[in-house]
Amino acid sequence: QVQLVESGGGLVQAGGSLRLSCAASGRTGSPYVMGWFRQAPGKARECAAAISRYGSSTYYADSVKGRFTISRDNAKNTVYLQMNSLKPEDTAVYYCAARLGSVIATTPSGYPYWGQGTQVTVSS
């Protein structure tokens, strides 16, 4: 089992930046594939970004490409999501998720481990 705790959310004006962090604890001996998902009110949960076990591969949703950057520090068991040029439509609860194996998944069903989420609100 692995436990995930997100931090770094908050309220920011459009055009601003935030950096989310996700700290993993528990069975962290072998790195997990990690994903950042987001869910806006009334919408389905979607994968904003994901990163492979050692960071060699990444995935970004089209809506965040060029603005968001996912990275990880395996020594600290932490994954980050740097969000720049934020837009009101980025407003959502952001969740960190983890999965075993080596393949990046982009659907919620591919991740058995989830954090509690952190709210990101972008004002216009």
Image (tube, helix red, strand yellow):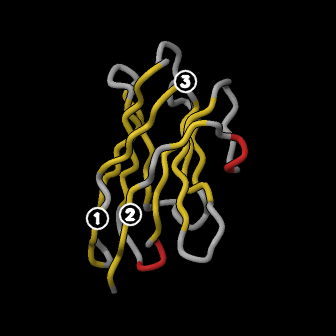
User: Which type of secondary structure does the marked residue at label 3 adopt?
Assistant: loop
User: Between residues 102 and 42, which one lies in front from this camera angle?
Assistant: 42
- Mark in front: 3 vs 1: 3
Q: Which of pointers 3 and 1 lies earlier in the amino acid sequence?
A: 3
Using residue 68 as the reference point, say whether residue 44 is left or right of it.
right
**Which labelled disc corresponds to residue 119?**
2
**Measured from the top left, where is residue 62 in percent x and y?**
61, 63
Quarter of the image for the N terminus: give it: top right
Task: Specify the amino acid type for callout 3.
Answer: Gln
Q: Are marks 3 and 2 in contact (CB under 8 Å)?
A: no
Task: Specify the amino acid type for callout 2.
Answer: Gln
- Residue that numbered label 1 is attached to: 10
Question: Label 3: few (<14), some or many (≥20) within 10 Å?
Answer: few
Question: Label 1: few (<14), some or many (≥20) within 10 Å?
Answer: some
Q: Residue furthest top?
A: 29
Q: Quadrant of residue 44?
A: bottom right
Quarter of the image for the C terminus: give it: bottom left
At x 55% / y 43%, what residue is drawn?
Answer: 35
Q: Does 83 sit above or below residue 29?
A: below
For the residues labelled 2 and 1, the Cα–Cα distance comes to: 6 Å
Q: Does 87 sit above or below residue 26?
A: below
At x 38% / y 63%, what residue is drawn?
Answer: 119
**Which labelled disc corresponds to residue 62?**
none
Q: Are marks 2 and 1 in contact (CB under 8 Å)?
A: yes
User: Which type of secondary structure does the marked residue at label 2 adopt?
Assistant: strand
Q: Residue furthest bottom?
A: 124
Using residue 24 as the reference point, say whether residue 39 is left or right of it.
right
**Which labelled disc corresponds to residue 1?**
3
Task: Specify the amino acid type for callout 1.
Answer: Gly
Using residue 39 as the reference point, say whether residue 107 is left or right of it.
right
